[in-house]
Image: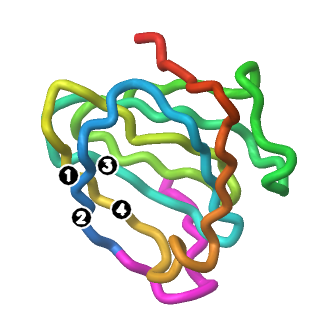
Amino acid sequence: EDAQLVLHNGTPRFYIMRLPTIGHSFHRITYHRDVTQCLGSLSPHPWYIAVAAPSGSVEAYPKEEDLRLFRVPHGTFIKMHEATWHAGPLFDGAEHLDFYNLELSDTNTVDHNTHEYDDTEYYVQL
C-alpha cells in the first residue's frame, strides 16, 4: 500500500539535505502540523530518529517516556504523519550524511514548531 502523503497545503519539495554529525543526543524536538514528512539516507550508514505522538501544541511537548527511538537502515525511506514530534536524523561515524527529504517548500519557515529542552540533553541509547 502506498504511503498516504499530505502535501496539498503548499508546494511539495523533494530535495537532498546534507547534515553534519551531531552524535546521538538532542536538545530540541520539532513537529510540522500541516504536512507529512519523508526522510531517507543516501549513505550506507544506519541512522536514528526519536519520535513521539502528536500533542497539538509546543506547550505539550513530549517527555522522555513519550519518546520512541528507531534505527533506520540504509535503503529505508520513512514517512512521518502530520504533527509527529521528531528529533533527528541522529548519527555518528561520518563527518556528514546526505538525506532525501520530502515536505513542503516553506515547511521550515511557516510550520516549524520546536521545543528546546531545559538543561537536559537526551542521549540515544544504542
Q: Check if mark 2's residue and mark 4's residue have beta carbons within 8 Å.
A: yes
> CA gap, disc 2 to disc 1?
6 Å
- Residue bearing mark 4: 101
> CA gap, disc 3 to disc 2?
9 Å
Left or right: where 77 falls relative to 8: left
> CA gap, disc 3 to disc 4?
7 Å
Q: Which residues are magenta?
A: 1-13
Observer-nearest of 117 and 5: 117
Q: Check if mark 2's residue and mark 1's residue have beta carbons within 8 Å.
A: yes
Q: Quadrant of residue 32?
A: bottom right
- Residue bearing mark 1: 98
Left or right: where 119 falls relative to 71: right
- Residue bearing mark 3: 40
* Residue drawn 71% across the image and 22% down it: 64
> CA gap, disc 4 to disc 1?
10 Å
Judged by its main secondary structure, the magenta piece is loop
What secondary structure is marked by label 3?
strand
Q: Quadrant of residue 97?
A: top left
Earlier residue among tags 3 and 2: 2
* Image quarter (top left, top right, bottom left or bottom right) of the C terminus: top left
* Residue drawn 63% across the image and 25% down it: 120
* Tag 4: amino acid: Asn
Residue 31, position as x, y percentages in the image: 64, 55
